[in-house]
Image (cartoon, helix red, strand yellow):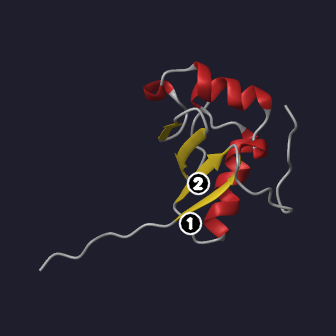
Amino acid sequence: MSSLDVRRFIVISTGHVTEATAKLLDGVPVDQWPCLGGRYGDYGWFVYAHDENCGTGKDRIPDDLYAVMIWARKKRCDYVLLDCDGDQIDALPHHDW
């Protein structure tokens, strides 16, 4: 009998990343992102909540996005769905862009 690997994700506002990070995620092909993830249609992004930021230069996860990942890990989530209609979280900075 095989056991399934069940993961958790959390949905929060796209405003928890800066406009610069949003432009990076929208403007760079997914296979060149500094983290695992993908676009969520026109509504945001779905990303793996990395627990380590090992990259340098263009491979480094932007600080604002990494802060979201660390926050999600503390909530025991493996992934984050940054959704334009997601809730704003008081514990994280919110950027109006």
Q: Is residue 30 above or below residue 17?
A: above
Image quadrant where one finds the C terminus: top right
Q: SS at mark 2?
A: strand
Q: Is residue 74 above or below residue 92?
A: below
| Percent coordinates x, y for residue 38 in the rendering | 48, 37
Q: Is residue 26 left or right of residue 37?
A: right
Which residue shows up at 61% across the image and 29% down it?
A: 25
Task: Work out whether residue 41 or residue 7 is closer to the camera in this orientation and state it.
Answer: 41
Can you tell which quarter of the image residue 43 is in?
A: top right
Q: Is residue 30 left or right of residue 6?
A: right
Mark 2: which amino acid? Val
Q: Which residue is mark 1?
A: 77
The reply to whether callout 1 and callout 2 are in contact (CB within 8 Å) is yes
| Percent coordinates x, y for residue 52 in the rendering | 58, 52
What is the crowding at mark 1: few (fewer than 14 residues within 10 Å), some, or many (at least 20)?
some
Which residue shows up at 57% across the image and 40% down it?
A: 45
Which residue shows up at 68% across the image and 47% down it?
A: 66
Q: Residue furthest bottom?
A: 1
Which residue shows up at 84% across the image and 62% down it?
A: 91
Task: Work out whether residue 78 or residue 82 is closer to the camera in this orientation and state it.
Answer: 82
Residue 23's label in the rendered image is none
Q: SS at mark 1?
A: loop
Mark 1: which amino acid? Cys
Across the whole image, how many numbered discs are drawn on residues? Answer: 2
Q: Is residue 71 left or right of residue 44?
A: right
What is the crowding at mark 2: few (fewer than 14 residues within 10 Å), some, or many (at least 20)?
many
Can you tell which quarter of the image residue 70 is in?
A: bottom right
Image quadrant where one finds the N terminus: bottom left
Task: Work out whether residue 67 or residue 26 is closer to the camera in this orientation and state it.
Answer: 26
| Percent coordinates x, y for residue 88 in the rendering | 80, 56
Residue 80's label in the rendered image is 2
Q: How far is the residue under mark 1 from the one under mark 2?
A: 7 Å
